[in-house]
Image (spheres, rainbow, N blue to C red):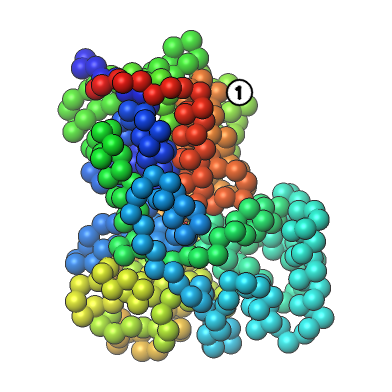
Amino acid sequence: MKQAKYDVVIIGAGLGGLTAGAVLVTAGFKVLVAEKVSFVGGRCGTLEYKGFHLPTGAIWLSEEVHGDLARAVGAEFNLRVIDPPYYFRIGGKDYPAPIAGIFRTMFGYASKDEGEIVRVMKAFKRGIAWQEPSMNMSVYDWLRQYTDNEAIAGIIRAFVAMDTGLNHFELPAGEFFKFVKETSFVKRGGFLAQGGGTLTQALAKVIRDKGSDIWTRCQATQIMVRDGVAVGVRVRKDDMEDIEVSATAIACNAGPKTAVELAGKENFGEGYMKDIAKIKAAPQMIIYVESEESLTDNKGMFMWPEARRVFCALDYTGICPEVSPPGKTLLEACSYLTNSEQPYDLKSEVELSIQDLKDNIPDFDKRAKILKIICYHNQYGLMRVWAGQPFDIKTPVENLYLACDSAAPHGWWGSSAAVRSGRLTAEEIARRFKPSVAKA
Ligand SMILES: Cc1cc2nc3c(=O)[nH]c(=O)nc-3n(C[C@H](O)[C@H](O)[C@H](O)COP(=O)(O)OP(=O)(O)OC[C@H]3O[C@@H](n4cnc5c(N)ncnc54)[C@H](O)[C@@H]3O)c2cc1C
Protein backbone atom coordinates (compact mmCIF):
# COMPACT_ATOMS: atom_id res chain seq x y z
CA MET A 1 0.00 0.00 0.00
CA LYS A 2 1.19 3.53 -0.78
CA GLN A 3 2.67 5.31 2.29
CA ALA A 4 2.75 8.98 3.33
CA LYS A 5 3.93 10.86 6.39
CA TYR A 6 2.65 14.05 8.03
CA ASP A 7 2.96 15.64 11.46
CA VAL A 8 -0.81 15.64 11.92
CA VAL A 9 -3.68 14.05 10.00
CA ILE A 10 -7.09 15.71 10.34
CA ILE A 11 -10.13 13.64 9.39
CA GLY A 12 -12.71 16.01 7.93
CA ALA A 13 -12.56 19.49 6.38
CA GLY A 14 -15.46 20.97 8.36
CA LEU A 15 -14.94 24.18 10.32
CA GLY A 16 -13.44 22.36 13.33
CA GLY A 17 -10.97 20.43 11.17
CA LEU A 18 -9.94 23.44 9.09
CA THR A 19 -9.56 25.55 12.25
CA ALA A 20 -7.20 22.96 13.74
CA GLY A 21 -5.36 22.70 10.42
CA ALA A 22 -4.94 26.46 9.95
CA VAL A 23 -3.68 26.94 13.54
CA LEU A 24 -1.24 24.01 13.20
CA VAL A 25 0.23 25.11 9.85
CA THR A 26 0.66 28.60 11.29
CA ALA A 27 2.72 26.98 14.06
CA GLY A 28 4.88 25.20 11.44
CA PHE A 29 3.28 21.72 11.38
CA LYS A 30 2.89 19.73 8.17
CA VAL A 31 -0.74 18.73 8.04
CA LEU A 32 -2.96 16.52 5.89
CA VAL A 33 -6.70 17.19 5.94
CA ALA A 34 -8.62 14.22 4.49
CA GLU A 35 -12.19 15.07 3.46
CA LYS A 36 -14.57 12.42 2.18
CA VAL A 37 -16.79 14.62 0.01
CA SER A 38 -15.77 16.81 -2.93
CA PHE A 39 -16.00 20.18 -1.14
CA VAL A 40 -14.59 21.71 2.04
CA GLY A 41 -16.65 23.23 4.83
CA GLY A 42 -18.93 20.39 5.98
CA ARG A 43 -21.86 22.09 7.73
CA CYS A 44 -20.19 25.47 7.22
CA GLY A 45 -19.91 25.42 3.45
CA THR A 46 -21.64 26.86 0.41
CA LEU A 47 -23.00 24.94 -2.58
CA GLU A 48 -24.43 26.24 -5.86
CA TYR A 49 -28.05 25.36 -6.56
CA LYS A 50 -30.07 26.80 -9.47
CA GLY A 51 -27.88 29.92 -9.49
CA PHE A 52 -28.15 30.46 -5.70
CA HIS A 53 -25.31 29.97 -3.23
CA LEU A 54 -26.98 27.84 -0.60
CA PRO A 55 -25.38 27.42 2.81
CA THR A 56 -24.79 23.82 3.91
CA GLY A 57 -25.33 24.95 7.52
CA ALA A 58 -23.89 27.92 9.42
CA ILE A 59 -24.46 31.46 8.18
CA TRP A 60 -24.38 33.56 11.36
CA LEU A 61 -20.77 34.06 12.51
CA SER A 62 -19.14 36.57 14.83
CA GLU A 63 -16.21 38.99 14.82
CA GLU A 64 -15.19 37.83 18.30
CA VAL A 65 -14.99 34.05 17.61
CA HIS A 66 -14.63 33.53 13.84
CA GLY A 67 -12.98 36.89 13.12
CA ASP A 68 -10.49 36.35 15.93
CA LEU A 69 -9.53 32.96 14.46
CA ALA A 70 -9.19 34.42 10.95
CA ARG A 71 -6.90 37.18 12.21
CA ALA A 72 -4.77 34.67 14.17
CA VAL A 73 -4.06 32.59 11.04
CA GLY A 74 -4.11 35.34 8.40
CA ALA A 75 -7.36 34.27 6.69
CA GLU A 76 -9.60 36.77 4.91
CA PHE A 77 -12.71 37.70 6.91
CA ASN A 78 -15.05 40.55 6.04
CA LEU A 79 -18.12 40.17 8.21
CA ARG A 80 -21.26 42.12 7.42
CA VAL A 81 -22.36 42.89 10.95
CA ILE A 82 -26.14 42.89 11.40
CA ASP A 83 -27.46 45.71 13.55
CA PRO A 84 -29.92 45.35 15.22
CA PRO A 85 -29.05 41.65 15.49
CA TYR A 86 -32.70 40.54 15.44
CA TYR A 87 -36.27 41.69 15.03
CA PHE A 88 -38.78 39.83 17.21
CA ARG A 89 -42.33 39.51 15.90
CA ILE A 90 -44.73 39.78 18.81
CA GLY A 91 -48.45 40.31 18.30
CA GLY A 92 -47.85 40.80 14.57
CA LYS A 93 -45.31 43.64 15.05
CA ASP A 94 -41.53 43.46 14.48
CA TYR A 95 -39.55 44.88 17.41
CA PRO A 96 -35.79 45.51 17.04
CA ALA A 97 -33.74 43.68 19.69
CA PRO A 98 -30.55 45.45 20.77
CA ILE A 99 -27.53 43.32 21.75
CA ALA A 100 -27.17 45.11 25.10
CA GLY A 101 -29.98 44.16 27.45
CA ILE A 102 -31.66 42.00 24.82
CA PHE A 103 -33.64 39.80 27.25
CA ARG A 104 -34.91 42.74 29.32
CA THR A 105 -36.00 44.56 26.17
CA MET A 106 -37.70 41.55 24.62
CA PHE A 107 -39.50 40.52 27.80
CA GLY A 108 -40.75 44.13 27.95
CA TYR A 109 -42.47 43.62 24.57
CA ALA A 110 -43.88 40.25 25.65
CA SER A 111 -45.35 41.33 29.01
CA LYS A 112 -47.15 44.39 30.31
CA ASP A 113 -46.60 43.22 33.90
CA GLU A 114 -43.53 45.04 35.23
CA GLY A 115 -43.50 42.85 38.37
CA GLU A 116 -43.25 39.73 36.23
CA ILE A 117 -40.35 41.15 34.19
CA VAL A 118 -38.47 42.16 37.36
CA ARG A 119 -39.02 38.67 38.86
CA VAL A 120 -37.72 36.88 35.73
CA MET A 121 -34.77 39.25 35.29
CA LYS A 122 -33.77 38.87 38.97
CA ALA A 123 -33.75 35.07 38.56
CA PHE A 124 -31.78 35.49 35.35
CA LYS A 125 -29.14 37.62 37.01
CA ARG A 126 -28.90 35.22 39.94
CA GLY A 127 -28.30 32.35 37.49
CA ILE A 128 -25.49 34.32 35.89
CA ALA A 129 -23.83 36.04 38.84
CA TRP A 130 -24.45 33.56 41.66
CA GLN A 131 -25.39 29.97 40.89
CA GLU A 132 -26.24 28.33 37.58
CA PRO A 133 -29.47 26.33 37.64
CA SER A 134 -29.35 22.53 37.58
CA MET A 135 -28.38 20.49 34.54
CA ASN A 136 -31.24 18.18 35.53
CA MET A 137 -34.03 20.58 34.64
CA SER A 138 -34.88 22.14 31.29
CA VAL A 139 -34.74 25.88 30.54
CA TYR A 140 -38.52 25.78 30.14
CA ASP A 141 -39.07 24.23 33.59
CA TRP A 142 -36.62 26.71 35.12
CA LEU A 143 -38.55 29.64 33.59
CA ARG A 144 -41.94 28.26 34.72
CA GLN A 145 -40.84 28.79 38.33
CA TYR A 146 -41.01 32.55 37.70
CA THR A 147 -43.66 33.00 35.02
CA ASP A 148 -46.25 31.14 32.99
CA ASN A 149 -46.15 33.80 30.29
CA GLU A 150 -45.90 31.80 27.05
CA ALA A 151 -44.72 34.86 25.09
CA ILE A 152 -41.63 35.10 27.32
CA ALA A 153 -41.13 31.33 26.99
CA GLY A 154 -41.45 31.73 23.20
CA ILE A 155 -38.56 34.22 23.15
CA ILE A 156 -36.33 31.81 25.04
CA ARG A 157 -37.51 28.97 22.81
CA ALA A 158 -36.48 30.86 19.66
CA PHE A 159 -33.01 31.62 21.09
CA VAL A 160 -32.47 28.02 22.15
CA ALA A 161 -33.63 26.59 18.81
CA MET A 162 -31.48 29.06 16.90
CA ASP A 163 -28.27 28.15 18.69
CA THR A 164 -28.72 24.47 19.53
CA GLY A 165 -31.48 23.02 17.33
CA LEU A 166 -33.22 21.90 20.54
CA ASN A 167 -36.54 22.84 22.09
CA HIS A 168 -36.49 24.85 25.31
CA PHE A 169 -37.93 21.82 27.14
CA GLU A 170 -34.93 19.72 25.99
CA LEU A 171 -31.96 21.97 26.79
CA PRO A 172 -30.62 21.74 30.38
CA ALA A 173 -31.10 25.04 32.22
CA GLY A 174 -27.50 24.93 33.52
CA GLU A 175 -26.17 24.64 29.96
CA PHE A 176 -28.21 27.67 28.86
CA PHE A 177 -26.72 29.79 31.63
CA LYS A 178 -23.21 28.57 30.83
CA PHE A 179 -23.81 29.73 27.26
CA VAL A 180 -25.00 33.17 28.38
CA LYS A 181 -21.89 33.51 30.58
CA GLU A 182 -19.30 31.93 28.25
CA THR A 183 -20.29 33.83 25.15
CA SER A 184 -21.31 37.20 26.60
CA PHE A 185 -18.20 38.69 24.96
CA VAL A 186 -19.76 38.09 21.52
CA LYS A 187 -21.31 41.38 20.44
CA ARG A 188 -20.84 41.63 16.67
CA GLY A 189 -22.53 38.92 14.60
CA GLY A 190 -23.35 38.83 10.92
CA PHE A 191 -22.93 37.08 7.57
CA LEU A 192 -20.04 36.66 5.14
CA ALA A 193 -20.49 37.42 1.42
CA GLN A 194 -21.33 33.83 0.51
CA GLY A 195 -22.15 32.33 3.87
CA GLY A 196 -20.04 30.10 6.10
CA GLY A 197 -18.26 28.69 3.04
CA THR A 198 -16.43 32.00 2.64
CA LEU A 199 -14.67 31.33 5.96
CA THR A 200 -13.93 27.63 5.45
CA GLN A 201 -12.54 28.31 1.96
CA ALA A 202 -10.31 31.06 3.40
CA LEU A 203 -9.01 28.64 6.07
CA ALA A 204 -8.37 25.97 3.42
CA LYS A 205 -6.37 28.55 1.45
CA VAL A 206 -4.20 29.26 4.51
CA ILE A 207 -3.49 25.52 4.89
CA ARG A 208 -2.53 25.09 1.22
CA ASP A 209 -0.58 28.36 0.99
CA LYS A 210 1.55 27.25 3.95
CA GLY A 211 2.55 24.05 2.10
CA SER A 212 0.18 21.55 3.73
CA ASP A 213 -2.42 19.43 1.95
CA ILE A 214 -6.18 19.00 1.78
CA TRP A 215 -7.37 15.94 -0.10
CA THR A 216 -11.07 15.99 -0.98
CA ARG A 217 -12.91 12.83 -2.10
CA CYS A 218 -10.66 11.13 0.38
CA GLN A 219 -12.36 9.07 3.08
CA ALA A 220 -10.60 7.97 6.24
CA THR A 221 -11.27 4.22 6.50
CA GLN A 222 -9.24 3.36 9.60
CA ILE A 223 -7.40 5.06 12.43
CA MET A 224 -4.34 2.89 13.10
CA VAL A 225 -3.80 2.24 16.81
CA ARG A 226 -0.77 0.49 18.31
CA ASP A 227 -0.67 -0.29 22.06
CA GLY A 228 -3.40 2.27 22.76
CA VAL A 229 -1.64 5.02 20.76
CA ALA A 230 -2.90 6.43 17.44
CA VAL A 231 -0.13 6.24 14.85
CA GLY A 232 -1.78 7.01 11.53
CA VAL A 233 -4.82 6.90 9.27
CA ARG A 234 -5.72 4.76 6.27
CA VAL A 235 -7.52 6.74 3.59
CA ARG A 236 -9.21 5.87 0.32
CA LYS A 237 -8.65 8.54 -2.32
CA ASP A 238 -11.03 9.03 -5.27
CA ASP A 239 -12.80 5.75 -4.40
CA MET A 240 -9.86 3.69 -5.63
CA GLU A 241 -6.45 4.39 -4.11
CA ASP A 242 -5.68 3.25 -0.52
CA ILE A 243 -2.93 5.16 1.28
CA GLU A 244 -1.48 4.61 4.76
CA VAL A 245 -0.59 7.95 6.31
CA SER A 246 1.51 7.91 9.48
CA ALA A 247 1.38 10.87 11.86
CA THR A 248 2.36 11.95 15.36
CA ALA A 249 -1.17 13.11 16.18
CA ILE A 250 -4.60 12.67 14.66
CA ALA A 251 -7.58 15.01 15.00
CA CYS A 252 -11.01 13.69 14.10
CA ASN A 253 -13.37 16.41 12.88
CA ALA A 254 -16.03 13.86 11.96
CA GLY A 255 -17.29 13.50 15.55
CA PRO A 256 -16.77 11.08 18.42
CA LYS A 257 -18.90 8.28 16.92
CA THR A 258 -16.83 8.22 13.72
CA ALA A 259 -13.60 8.33 15.75
CA VAL A 260 -14.71 5.18 17.57
CA GLU A 261 -15.84 3.45 14.37
CA LEU A 262 -12.50 4.18 12.67
CA ALA A 263 -10.22 3.30 15.58
CA GLY A 264 -12.20 0.30 16.88
CA LYS A 265 -14.40 0.35 19.98
CA GLU A 266 -12.06 -2.06 21.81
CA ASN A 267 -9.67 0.92 22.23
CA PHE A 268 -12.07 3.20 24.08
CA GLY A 269 -13.16 1.58 27.33
CA GLU A 270 -16.57 1.04 28.87
CA GLY A 271 -17.22 4.56 30.20
CA TYR A 272 -16.50 6.22 26.87
CA MET A 273 -18.65 3.71 25.00
CA LYS A 274 -21.53 4.47 27.40
CA ASP A 275 -21.18 8.19 26.52
CA ILE A 276 -21.14 7.30 22.82
CA ALA A 277 -24.31 5.23 23.21
CA LYS A 278 -26.09 8.28 24.70
CA ILE A 279 -25.35 10.54 21.72
CA LYS A 280 -28.38 12.27 20.24
CA ALA A 281 -28.09 14.73 17.34
CA ALA A 282 -30.09 17.99 17.25
CA PRO A 283 -32.09 18.46 14.03
CA GLN A 284 -33.13 21.61 12.21
CA MET A 285 -35.33 22.08 9.17
CA ILE A 286 -34.48 24.76 6.64
CA ILE A 287 -36.87 25.97 3.95
CA TYR A 288 -35.08 27.97 1.25
CA VAL A 289 -37.52 30.43 -0.33
CA GLU A 290 -36.96 32.42 -3.52
CA SER A 291 -38.81 35.53 -4.65
CA GLU A 292 -38.35 38.48 -6.96
CA GLU A 293 -38.63 41.11 -4.25
CA SER A 294 -37.68 40.99 -0.59
CA LEU A 295 -40.31 39.28 1.55
CA THR A 296 -39.39 41.27 4.68
CA ASP A 297 -39.87 44.95 5.58
CA ASN A 298 -36.39 45.33 7.08
CA LYS A 299 -33.07 43.63 6.46
CA GLY A 300 -31.70 40.97 8.80
CA MET A 301 -32.93 38.16 11.03
CA PHE A 302 -36.56 37.89 12.04
CA MET A 303 -37.49 35.81 15.05
CA TRP A 304 -41.06 34.51 15.18
CA PRO A 305 -41.50 33.29 18.77
CA GLU A 306 -45.26 32.91 18.33
CA ALA A 307 -45.14 30.72 15.21
CA ARG A 308 -45.76 26.95 15.26
CA ARG A 309 -42.39 25.77 13.89
CA VAL A 310 -40.48 28.55 12.10
CA PHE A 311 -38.55 30.44 14.77
CA CYS A 312 -36.40 32.53 12.44
CA ALA A 313 -36.58 33.90 8.91
CA LEU A 314 -33.28 35.15 7.52
CA ASP A 315 -33.39 37.74 4.81
CA TYR A 316 -30.19 36.38 3.28
CA THR A 317 -30.08 38.47 0.10
CA GLY A 318 -30.77 41.68 2.04
CA ILE A 319 -27.40 41.28 3.78
CA CYS A 320 -25.55 39.39 1.01
CA PRO A 321 -26.88 40.12 -2.49
CA GLU A 322 -24.14 37.80 -3.85
CA VAL A 323 -26.04 34.68 -2.77
CA SER A 324 -28.82 35.08 -5.34
CA PRO A 325 -28.82 35.33 -9.13
CA PRO A 326 -29.79 38.78 -10.53
CA GLY A 327 -33.42 39.70 -9.90
CA LYS A 328 -33.92 37.04 -7.21
CA THR A 329 -33.86 37.06 -3.43
CA LEU A 330 -33.29 34.23 -0.98
CA LEU A 331 -34.98 33.84 2.40
CA GLU A 332 -34.06 31.04 4.76
CA ALA A 333 -36.73 29.85 7.21
CA CYS A 334 -35.38 27.85 10.17
CA SER A 335 -37.71 25.49 12.05
CA TYR A 336 -37.40 23.32 15.09
CA LEU A 337 -39.21 19.97 15.23
CA THR A 338 -41.85 18.95 17.80
CA ASN A 339 -39.24 16.73 19.44
CA SER A 340 -35.55 16.57 18.65
CA GLU A 341 -35.55 12.81 19.13
CA GLN A 342 -36.70 10.49 16.40
CA PRO A 343 -39.24 9.31 15.41
CA TYR A 344 -40.72 12.55 14.07
CA ASP A 345 -43.26 12.97 11.31
CA LEU A 346 -41.39 15.09 8.79
CA LYS A 347 -44.40 15.52 6.49
CA SER A 348 -46.47 17.25 9.17
CA GLU A 349 -43.44 19.25 10.38
CA VAL A 350 -43.00 20.61 6.84
CA GLU A 351 -46.70 21.43 6.57
CA LEU A 352 -46.67 23.36 9.85
CA SER A 353 -43.60 25.34 8.76
CA ILE A 354 -45.18 26.24 5.42
CA GLN A 355 -48.32 27.36 7.26
CA ASP A 356 -46.12 29.65 9.38
CA LEU A 357 -44.63 31.19 6.24
CA LYS A 358 -48.11 31.80 4.83
CA ASP A 359 -49.31 33.36 8.08
CA ASN A 360 -46.30 35.66 8.49
CA ILE A 361 -45.51 36.71 4.90
CA PRO A 362 -48.37 38.53 3.15
CA ASP A 363 -49.36 36.93 -0.20
CA PHE A 364 -46.76 34.21 0.28
CA ASP A 365 -48.27 31.98 -2.43
CA LYS A 366 -48.22 34.77 -5.03
CA ARG A 367 -44.85 36.31 -4.18
CA ALA A 368 -42.69 33.37 -3.15
CA LYS A 369 -41.60 29.95 -4.34
CA ILE A 370 -40.07 27.19 -2.26
CA LEU A 371 -36.64 26.44 -3.68
CA LYS A 372 -35.66 23.55 -1.44
CA ILE A 373 -36.51 21.97 1.93
CA ILE A 374 -33.84 20.13 3.90
CA CYS A 375 -34.14 18.54 7.30
CA TYR A 376 -30.62 18.46 8.71
CA HIS A 377 -30.41 15.60 11.16
CA ASN A 378 -28.30 12.69 12.47
CA GLN A 379 -24.61 13.35 11.64
CA TYR A 380 -25.69 16.49 9.74
CA GLY A 381 -27.93 17.93 12.44
CA LEU A 382 -27.43 21.48 13.69
CA MET A 383 -25.25 19.90 16.33
CA ARG A 384 -23.92 16.36 16.14
CA VAL A 385 -24.38 15.94 19.89
CA TRP A 386 -27.01 17.74 22.00
CA ALA A 387 -25.77 20.89 23.69
CA GLY A 388 -25.03 20.02 27.32
CA GLN A 389 -23.37 16.67 26.55
CA PRO A 390 -19.98 17.73 25.14
CA PHE A 391 -17.01 15.40 24.73
CA ASP A 392 -13.44 16.23 25.73
CA ILE A 393 -10.98 17.05 22.93
CA LYS A 394 -8.81 14.14 24.17
CA THR A 395 -10.05 10.60 23.57
CA PRO A 396 -9.01 7.45 25.49
CA VAL A 397 -6.68 6.66 22.55
CA GLU A 398 -3.43 8.53 23.10
CA ASN A 399 -2.68 11.18 20.45
CA LEU A 400 -6.18 10.89 19.02
CA TYR A 401 -8.09 14.17 19.46
CA LEU A 402 -11.49 15.50 18.48
CA ALA A 403 -11.85 18.86 16.71
CA CYS A 404 -15.58 19.41 16.14
CA ASP A 405 -18.71 21.06 17.51
CA SER A 406 -19.33 18.15 19.89
CA ALA A 407 -15.98 18.59 21.68
CA ALA A 408 -15.93 22.11 23.11
CA PRO A 409 -16.44 23.28 26.70
CA HIS A 410 -19.96 23.55 28.14
CA GLY A 411 -21.76 26.63 26.87
CA TRP A 412 -20.14 26.59 23.42
CA TRP A 413 -22.53 25.72 20.63
CA GLY A 414 -22.65 25.44 16.82
CA SER A 415 -19.88 26.85 14.67
CA SER A 416 -18.37 28.73 17.64
CA ALA A 417 -17.95 25.34 19.35
CA ALA A 418 -16.26 23.94 16.23
CA VAL A 419 -13.79 26.87 16.23
CA ARG A 420 -13.13 26.59 19.96
CA SER A 421 -12.60 22.84 19.70
CA GLY A 422 -10.28 23.14 16.69
CA ARG A 423 -8.20 25.80 18.41
CA LEU A 424 -7.97 23.88 21.70
CA THR A 425 -6.89 20.70 19.90
CA ALA A 426 -4.29 22.49 17.78
CA GLU A 427 -2.89 24.32 20.80
CA GLU A 428 -2.65 21.07 22.75
CA ILE A 429 -0.86 19.30 19.87
CA ALA A 430 1.54 22.27 19.47
CA ARG A 431 2.24 22.17 23.23
CA ARG A 432 3.07 18.45 23.20
CA PHE A 433 4.89 18.02 19.90
CA LYS A 434 7.42 19.85 17.76
CA PRO A 435 6.82 20.31 14.04
CA SER A 436 9.05 18.06 11.91
CA VAL A 437 10.13 18.57 8.34
CA ALA A 438 8.13 15.50 7.30
CA LYS A 439 7.25 15.35 3.63
CA ALA A 440 4.44 13.40 2.00
C1 LIG B 1 -28.95 24.04 8.93
C2 LIG B 1 -27.87 24.45 9.88
C3 LIG B 1 -27.74 25.80 10.19
C4 LIG B 1 -26.74 26.21 11.07
N1 LIG B 1 -26.60 27.54 11.34
C5 LIG B 1 -25.61 27.94 12.14
C6 LIG B 1 -25.34 29.33 12.31
O1 LIG B 1 -25.97 30.18 11.65
N2 LIG B 1 -24.33 29.68 13.16
C7 LIG B 1 -23.60 28.75 13.85
O2 LIG B 1 -22.72 29.13 14.63
N3 LIG B 1 -23.79 27.43 13.68
C8 LIG B 1 -24.76 27.02 12.82
N4 LIG B 1 -24.93 25.68 12.59
C9 LIG B 1 -24.05 24.71 13.28
C10 LIG B 1 -22.71 24.61 12.56
O3 LIG B 1 -22.91 24.55 11.17
C11 LIG B 1 -21.95 23.37 13.01
O4 LIG B 1 -21.95 23.31 14.42
C12 LIG B 1 -20.49 23.39 12.54
O5 LIG B 1 -20.37 23.81 11.19
C13 LIG B 1 -19.93 21.99 12.73
O6 LIG B 1 -18.62 21.94 12.26
P1 LIG B 1 -17.73 20.65 12.48
O7 LIG B 1 -16.41 20.98 11.87
O8 LIG B 1 -17.78 20.22 13.89
O9 LIG B 1 -18.44 19.45 11.66
P2 LIG B 1 -18.82 19.25 10.14
O10 LIG B 1 -19.07 20.54 9.47
O11 LIG B 1 -19.90 18.23 10.10
O12 LIG B 1 -17.50 18.63 9.47
C14 LIG B 1 -17.16 17.28 9.51
C15 LIG B 1 -16.51 16.91 8.19
O13 LIG B 1 -15.99 15.58 8.27
C16 LIG B 1 -16.20 14.93 7.04
N5 LIG B 1 -16.12 13.47 7.24
C17 LIG B 1 -17.00 12.67 7.91
N6 LIG B 1 -16.55 11.39 7.93
C18 LIG B 1 -15.35 11.39 7.29
C19 LIG B 1 -14.39 10.37 6.97
N7 LIG B 1 -14.56 9.09 7.34
N8 LIG B 1 -13.29 10.74 6.27
C20 LIG B 1 -13.09 12.02 5.89
N9 LIG B 1 -13.98 13.04 6.15
C21 LIG B 1 -15.09 12.71 6.84
C22 LIG B 1 -17.58 15.44 6.61
O14 LIG B 1 -17.79 15.25 5.22
C23 LIG B 1 -17.49 16.92 7.01
O15 LIG B 1 -16.96 17.70 5.98
C24 LIG B 1 -25.89 25.25 11.67
C25 LIG B 1 -26.01 23.90 11.32
C26 LIG B 1 -26.98 23.49 10.43
C27 LIG B 1 -27.08 22.05 10.03
What is the x, y in percent for residue 125?
77, 64
Of residues 287 and 47, the one nearer the viewer is 47
**Viewport quadrant of the C terminus:** top left
List x then y, in percent, for residue 404: 46, 41
Residue matched to label 1: 270
Place of residue 143 in the rendered image (x, y in percent of width and height, measured from the top left): 74, 66
Mark 1 nearby-residue class (10 Å; few <14, some 14–19, many ≥20): few
Q: Foreground residue, 212 or 58?
A: 212
The residue shown at (36%, 89%) is 363
Image quarter for residue 247? top left
**In this rendering, is residue 57 above or below 402?**
below
Question: Does the numbered disc 1 mark a residue whose Cβ is under 8 Å from ligand 1?
Answer: no
Q: Is residue 31 left or right of residue 278?
A: left
Q: Nearer the viewer, residue 124 or 387?
A: 124
Up-down: is 227 above or below 118? above
Residue 438 against residue 429 in the figure, above or below? above
Residue displayed at 36% across by 28% down: 29
Would residue 389 be seen by someone viewing this image from the given angle? yes
